[in-house]
Image (cartoon, rainbow, N blue to C red):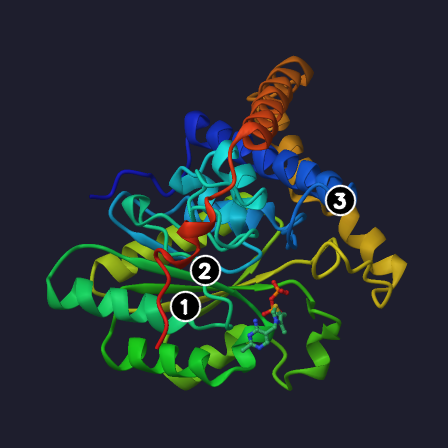
Amino acid sequence: MQVKPLELGTKELMDIYYLMRLGRAIEDRLNLLYKGGKLPGAIYLGTGQEAIEIGASYALEEGDVLAPTHRDMMSQLPRGITPREVFLQHYARANSLTHGKGEDNYQGDLRRGTFATVSMLPNFYPVAAGAALAFKLRKEPRVAMAYCGEGATSVGDWHEALNVASVHNLPVVFVVINNGYAYSTPVYKEMKVANVADRAVAYAMPGVIVDGNDVVECYREAKKAVERARDGGGPTLIEAKTMRMRGHAGHDSATYVAKDIIDLWTKRDPIVRFEAYLNEKGFLNEDSKKEVIDRINAMVEDAVTFAEASPYPEPKEAIEDVYAE
Ligand SMILES: Cc1ncc(C[n+]2csc(CCOP(=O)(O)OP(=O)(O)O)c2C)c(N)n1
């Protein structure tokens, strides 16, 4: 079952670099399309969070499941979501993963072990705990991983999920991306604890803090937590310290964030840092970097063209695949 090593080799490191650059390119393009009025819905971008978005979910293996939020499109890249699927989703076309229903990041794909995002935060935390309970009852060596932001940790469902996972020693990894703000609310206005990870003590599980802009550290800690869960060691809470580098959504210019904070975090850009690391190891140079970026730009171009040429759903499809109670 376990395939990926704890210490990554050249192939995996370059794979992660490609995914981080792909995530950035997709989001930059989505931002431009949104600003140009081309997209029918909202955009919630995770720009600046590439290290934790990709580093943590990269630690999952085939058969594991992922429960992401509205901001975590990039966490789905290691699970195999394609640029075409992302743009089809944002263009709300009939051949998107949600068949044109929903126009932002609320896509998922059970074939690849990714649950569709639920809008209410963090309702997918209990869902991940539930999946982990099923794995345990069926004695399957599988792991669930859930993502959310620090704001969502103030909601009761979050605590219920951690409690049930702890009591039943479930194979689940809870990733909290602490990006400083929940919409316009800074962390210090929503919690008294210094770290989200401190909350793990209440549920007798490990609470691990990682540098959310260091992809190697994000992967390594997620990998340890995933394999501990798979080996019967129970759940882990991982808090990644990072910064939301754009507004809450496309319409939000985030003027409530001081410029010097953004300047500080710009210097910590996870992709630039990873490039320096790869360069030092002799895995990346200007030519190979250009080759990766050119390849990605061509894929993004193809995806936008494909999405724009794809059909909208038929009106009669509006009531298909819809559940209400
Ligand atoms: C229960 C619930 N309350 C309010 C919202 C509206 N809402 C959507 S995103 C968001 C901010 C969430 O902040 P955080 O959890 O820190 O994640 P981030 O957006 O920073 O990634 C809010 C308040 C919601 N989706 N669900």
Residue at figure coordinates x 62%, y 24% from the top left:
301
Q: Is residue 304 left or right of residue 269?
A: left
Upstream in sequence: badge 2 or badge 3:
3
Figure quadrant of residue 173: bottom left
User: CA–CA distance between discs 3 and 1?
Assistant: 31 Å
Dot 3 or dot 1: first in sequence order is: 3
* Residue type highlighted by circle 3: Gly
> Mark 1 touching mark 2, by CB under 8 A?
yes
Residue identifier under label 1: 124
Percent coordinates x, y for residue 210 in the rendering? 55, 59
Amino acid type at circle 2 is: Thr
Looking at the rendered structure, which numbered label has been put on residue 37?
3
- Front residue of 308 and 250: 308
Residue 125: image quadrant is: bottom left
Quarter the C terminus occupies: bottom left
Q: Position of residue 290 (x, y in %)?
A: 66, 17
Q: Residues within 10 Å of mark 1 (few under 14, many from 20)?
A: many
Asked whether 118 or 57 is in front, the reply is 118
The Cα atoms of the two marked residues, 2 and 3, are separated by 24 Å
Q: Nearer the viewer, mark 3 or mark 1?
A: 3
Q: Which residue is mark 2?
A: 117
Q: Earlier in the sequence, mark 1 or mark 2?
A: 2
CA distance separating discs 1 and 2:
7 Å
Residue 53 is tagged as none
Judge whether 115 appears above or below 219 on screen.
Answer: below
Q: Position of residue 138 (x, y in %)?
A: 10, 63
Q: Secondary structure at mark 3?
A: loop
Assess disc 2: are there few (<14), some (14-19) or many (≥20) residues with their C-alpha within 10 Å of its C-alpha: many
